[in-house]
Amino acid sequence: MSYLLYLMICGVPNHPIGVFLALEMSFVILLVGMRVGLVWPAVAEASVEKGMQ
């Protein structure tokens, strides 16, 4: 993981590694967020609570 971060910071000449890693990390962050139990969009959670009251 730290090596991928190093590549993203330094870059690789003539290779779009930064764009690839940005897309991959956004996907990983999304999957981790869903696994932890975050609800997206957050507005859906608020509307459910209002309906229960």
Image (cartoon, rainbow, N blue to C red):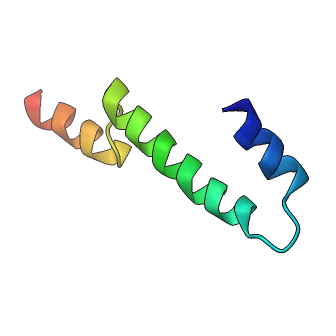
- Residue 29 in percent (x, y) is at 50, 40
In the image, taking residue 34 as reference, residue 20 lies left or right, namely right
Which residue appears at 9% of the width and 29% of the height? 52
Front residue of this view, candidates 12 and 42:
12
Q: Nearer the viewer, residue 5 or 29?
A: 5
Q: Give the total of numbered labels.
A: 0
Quadrant containing the C terminus is top left
Residue reaching furthest bottom?
14
- Residue at x 11%, y 37% (from the top left corner): 51
Q: Quadrant of the N terminus?
A: top right
- 38 sits left or right of 53 in the view: right
Query: Residue 27 appears at what percent x and percent y?
Result: 47, 50
Q: Residue furthest left?
A: 52
Name above or below for residue 39 compared with residue 16: above
- Snapshot quadrant of residue 35: top left
Q: At 82% from the left edge and 41% from the top edge, which residue is drawn?
A: 6
Residue 4 percent location from the top left of the image = 71, 42
Quadrant position of residue 22:
bottom right
> 45 and 25: which one is in front?
25
Front residue of 2 and 41:
2
Q: Is residue 11 above or below residue 40?
A: below
Q: Residue at x 78, y 51 (%)?
A: 8
Q: Position of residue 28 (x, y in %)?
A: 48, 42
